[in-house]
Amino acid sequence: MKANKQQTRDNHMECHHKMQARIQEAEDTIQEQHLVIEALVEEKASLLQTIQGLQEDNGASAPFDDEWEEEPKEDPEEEGLEDIPIGDGEIVDE
């Protein structure tokens, strides 16, 4: 009985250590990803600054700002599309 309890404890500890190793691995991966994201953000800022400098050098009327404008959604009626009536599935020859 005592040996069985010890075996159960040993298995539990082994499982615990494996889980701790997985958690640490996941945390390391997240930290690496965070560092990559920070580097990309810095690179983006540098590129935006370069673009803005080039626009100013070329006399652009509005400097590039880090804000992207969303294109307005087009209204299908404005495109000249008509509502197509939905019939009962019959084909009509005209």
Image: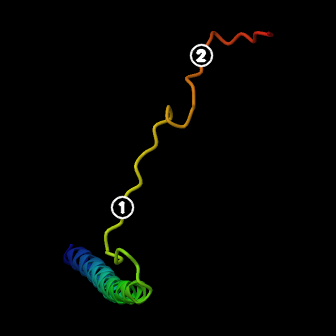
Secondary structure of the residue carrying tag 1 is: loop
Q: How is the image coloured?
A: rainbow
Whether residue 85 sits left or right of residue 70 in the image: it is right
Q: Residue at x 76, y 9 (%)?
A: 92
Measured as percent of width and height from the top left, residue 80 is found at 57, 32
Front position in the image: 18 or 11: 18
Measured as percent of width and height from the top left, residue 1 is found at 21, 72
Q: Residue at x 41, y 85 (%)?
A: 51
Front position in the image: 84 or 90: 84
Q: Any mark on residue 86, and which?
A: 2
Furthest residue to the right?
Answer: 93
Whether residue 84 sits left or right of residue 6 in the image: it is right
Question: What amino acid is found at the position of numbered circle 2 in the picture?
Answer: Ile
Q: Quadrant of residue 8 in the image?
A: bottom left
Measured as percent of width and height from the top left, residue 30 is found at 31, 81
Q: Residue at x 79, y 9 (%)?
A: 94
Query: In terms of sequence position, does the residue under pointer 1 or pointer 2 come before the other?
Result: 1
Question: What amino acid is found at the position of numbered circle 1 in the picture?
Answer: Glu
State how many labels appear.
2
Q: Residue at x 31, y 75 (%)?
A: 65
The residue where tag 1 is placed is 69
